[in-house]
Image: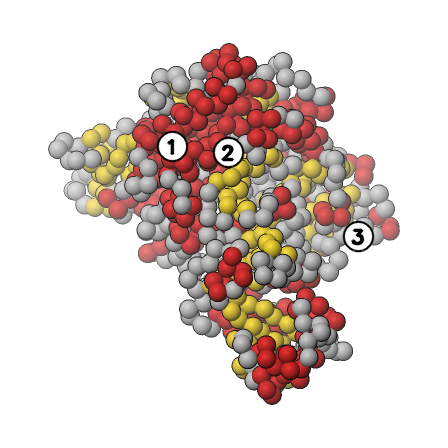
Amino acid sequence: MNHSPAPTAALADEFTFRPVDPDADAALLHGWVTDPKAVFWLMQDATVAQVREQYTKLDAWIGCYRGEPTVLMERYDPAEDEVGAVHRTTAGDVGMHVLTAPTERPVAGFTRAAITAVLRQLFADPAVRRVVVEPDVRNHAVHALNAAVGFRPVGVVTLPRTGKRALLSTCTREQFRAASGAREREPLAHLTPELWGRANRHLVRKALAEFAHERLITPVPLPDSGGWFGCASDDDSVAYRFRADLLALDHWRIDPDTIVRLRASDGVELPPDAAGLVLELRRSLGLSDEVLPVYLEEITSTLAALAFKLSLPEVSATELAAADFQSIEAGMTEGHPCFVANSGRLGFDAVDQLRYAPEAGAPVRLLWVAVHPDHAVHALGRDVDVRALGAPRIPAELAGYVAIPVHPWQWHNRLVVSYADEIAAGRVVLLGEGRAGGRDSHLAQQSIRTFFNSAAPDRPYVKTALSVLNMGFTRGLSADYMEHTPAINDWLADLVAADATLTGCGFSILREHAAVGYRHPQYPKGTPQQKQLAALWRESPLPLLAEGERAATMAALLHTDRDGAPLAAALVTSSGLTPEEWLNRYLTAYLVPVVHALCAYGLTFMPHGENVILVLDRDGAPLRVFFKDIAEEIAVLDPATPLPPQVARIRAEVPREQWALSVHTDVFDCFLRFLSAELHAAGTVHQDVFWAVVARVLRDYARAHPELADRFAALDLFAERFALSCLNRLQLRNNRQMVDLTDPAGALQFAGTLPNPITRH
């Protein structure tokens, strides 16, 4: 990675700051704040005397560029300002306003350099941990600049005193460093013995727990040990000892600090080693010669990602619970709760991880290509504002071509090789970065290939093809699938809008309402090479939030900080609700729509944590949810549910006895199992109370829908046991394509049954 100073950094180096002298600086500042470009400063009619009086009350500073006054910076305590009424402040928050002086000789990049210098000045105070800004919602130029230096939008708010409609945004030290290119580390700085050891202990804990849950291994209780268990390697050469609580749904909650790995021959203690564990259990895990080396590489890559996350500044669960949408997204450390090798990202190098991994938090500028219309797919849903998609202008000589956004890694590492013939023929043409002015700035989400527009949060997410191997799939996108994606989303949006139960829960979807792709004229249909050039746009949740609402990925509910404190428990505490009431609200928002869609329409989702966006109030109480990843992740199981022709691909033939698995497996086992365990361990709510609330929410739903009584009964959600469907077994069997998306039911791997925790309630 090139660590030489960027032009912005070089300009920022030229700034110095001094406190405002109200008497000496009043005339100067009057000229700045009354200039037409300072209309959002709300002082257009102020006199010099009024400016002097105003700045006797403020903590204000003047930034001088090469000795010349050019910037006004105000800092304030958000908790004591009107911002405090609409923003959950935490220790270390500081508010900031910035104004650059009017000039007739603008310098390219000057404003960004000025904001960079201001943030350096603020973060020079070690007490400052996060900067808060609230620019006018109409000031799009400032939103783009803020995003470029690391600010993440929280949401649109109305300030109570002034009535100003503002885009509240925040920026932490690490977000500023990532955005400014001033990350104080080398790409391999996290690969130290200490961090590698901690990452291994963490992943060995998860591997032992999930392999035991899927009955690939069978830990046995040690005699007279009080919760200690042991298991051995396939050849009995290594033994493991650990303390664990065995909770509902056969959930193994292992204390990582108690894990001991012993060599049987001499009793010598060995350090926990996740790759070593895989080799020691190779026969038990059923790893073939073909799968083993790739799985080991995925394990090693997952360890590297964990070590990187452990190298970042520590953020408590309480702090993260009050953070903005994208800070929470980037703050997730666990990845998928079930999969052990869940951060493979095979294809990324160490520099790519810093540039594109969500935990790095670095802004990404997507590339755009124009493709020949004869091989292009271009589909739009209803009411799509094509201007919001961010496409650059197509040159006149390429009239009729279709613009497709491309991940920079995908262009440099895949398309210039796999599509070199199409590039040479002029059928695929690189246009460069996005819209004129370069105001779009994107942040990678947990799914790696999906991007949030931090410069314009009301604009759609962009999901791109990214041909890295991650968690059982190469993450391509099919042009064939893109053709019907908007139609599928419009169909589902109409179904939701017409259903009183779903709308009554506040349930809605984030539509994938535009899609593009390119069919290479030579590669066979369905091959990975035909999934390398496509993209879709998904609605952003932020413009769909009401005043006082905020968003968070549902995956956050399973996050624990480095002290083991769960973020979910922090939300319960901050909400002011009892744990039972908080859970009831959450399950009504999340579980009821899943069950109702299945009962009423035979419709299933893939409702894991990263596919669900929670809407919370300012205090952390659940209000409603958005579901996303619709076109590739839903299925209609009921043959009686009518589907228009362009939506027919989501019809799936699944035996009726497996329908309930979309609740028992996807919700109970793959999400609520973990949430219940963490809240139980934190002392927030006992697991028996947790599952009693789940049962009550389902009973309340059944009572409210007597017209669906037969369908609800047929699902048998209160059955004493249900089949244990195993995700790691899928990846261990085939880690390049663990599921055939055209026949997902046919790929399931079962290992006996689980006791249903709601039966006795």
Amino acid carrying label 2: it is: Ala
Q: Which residue is mark 1?
A: 673
For mark 2, give the secondary structure: helix
Whether 432 is drawn above or below 98: the answer is above
Q: Position of residue 369 (x, y in %)?
A: 73, 48
Closer-to-camera residue (694/462): 694
Q: Secondary structure at mark 3?
A: loop
Q: CA distance from mark 1 to mark 2?
A: 18 Å
Mark 2: give few (<14), some (14-19) or many (20+) Cα within 10 Å. Answer: many
Q: How is the image coloured?
A: secondary structure
Which residue was labeled with disc 3?
393
Residue toward you, 428 or 340 = 340
| Secondary structure under the numbered disc 1 in the rendered image | helix
| Residue 301 position within the rendered picture, expressed as x and y whole percent measured from the top left | 45, 46
Q: In this rendering, which labeled residue sits more in front, label 3 or label 2?
A: 2
What quarter of the picture does the C terminus occupy?
top left
Q: Amino acid at mark 3?
A: Arg
Q: Residue at x 57, y 34 (%)?
A: 506
Question: Quarter-wise, where is residue 687 in the image?
Answer: top left
- Please identify the quadrant where the N terminus is shown: bottom right
Instruction: Give the answer, above or below, for where 195 lies relative to 345.
Output: below
Residue bearing mark 2: 589
Occupied quadrant, residue 13: bottom right
Label located before the other in sequence (1 or 2): 2
Whether residue 409 is visible to the viewer of this picture, yes or no, is no
